[in-house]
Image (cartoon, rainbow, N blue to C red):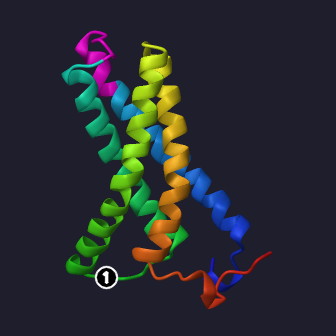
């Protein structure tokens, strides 16, 4: 859909759907890492750390591809351009990843079973994605809100 005809609501709905897809990829990746560890203690240890890293990486790649293509409709080409944009995209995600991890750890601390970990992670990802959209719009992709390319409808 051309940028001119998209509304803020359309973008918000797509972004929310993509956040759910990336969240699912993140949490499923964590589950894959943790389950073969024989139900390793979720209160700490190497298993949890590895799960956080793998899940975050999986979610990041999925979300970047969806955002670049569908949200920001970025058509740039070339390895150097993609490397720069993915690096900036990842950098913007550092702050929001700390939010995500903080909520995930808090959930695990409040309820030291897998439910607490995943509920906290889900909440942290939702908060982080709202912040990340605004950072990406401003610093990574060329979609300034003042350009008139998105209607207020």
Answer with left or right where residue 33 lies relative to residue 22. left
Residue 75 occupies which quadrant of the picture?
bottom left
* Residue 61 in view, yes or no: no
Q: Position of residue 85 (x, y in %)?
A: 31, 73
Which of 32/152 is in front? 152
| Residue in view at x 53 percent, y 27 percent | 119
Foreground residue, 93 or 2? 93
Relative to 73, residue 14 above or below = above
- Is residue 24 visible in this depiction of the protein? yes
Measuring from the top left, give residue 152's x and y in whole percent: 76, 77
* Residue 112 position (above or below residue 56): above
In this rendering, position of residue 54 left or right of residue 113: left
Q: Quadrant of the C terminus?
A: bottom right
- Residue visible at 51% across and 74% down in the picture: 72
User: x%, y% of residue 44?
Assistant: 27, 19
Q: Outermost residue toward the right?
A: 153
Q: Is residue 83 above or below residue 144?
A: above
Image quarter of the N terminus = bottom right
Which secondary structure lies at badge 1?
Answer: loop
Residue numbers of the magenta segment: 32-43
Determine which residue is flagged by label 1. Answer: 77
Q: Characterize the local packing of mark 1: few (<14), some (14-19) or many (20 or more) Cα atoms within 10 angstroms.
A: few
Q: Toward which corner of the image does residue 31 lie, by quadrant?
A: top left
**Residue 17 lies in magenta, yes or no?**
no
């Amino acid at each position: 859909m051309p940028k001119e005809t998209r509304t803020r609501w359309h973008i918000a709905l797509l972004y929310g759907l993509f956040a759910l897809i990336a969240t699912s990829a993140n949490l499923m990746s964590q589950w894959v890492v943790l389950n073969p560890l024989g139900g390793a203690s979720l209160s700490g240890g190497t298993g949890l750390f590895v799960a956080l890293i793998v899940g975050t990486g999986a979610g990041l790649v999925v979300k970047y591809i969806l955002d670049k293509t569908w949200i920001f409709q970025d058509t740039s080409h070339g390895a150097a351009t993609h490397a720069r944009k993915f690096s900036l995209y990842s950098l913007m995600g550092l702050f929001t990843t700390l939010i995500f991890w903080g909520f995930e750890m808090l959930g695990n601390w409040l309820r030291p079973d897998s439910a607490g970990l995943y509920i906290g992670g889900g909440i942290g990802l939702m908060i982080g994605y709202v912040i990340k959209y605004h950072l990406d719009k401003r610093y990574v992709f060329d979609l300034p809100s003042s350009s008139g390319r998105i209607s207020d409808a």
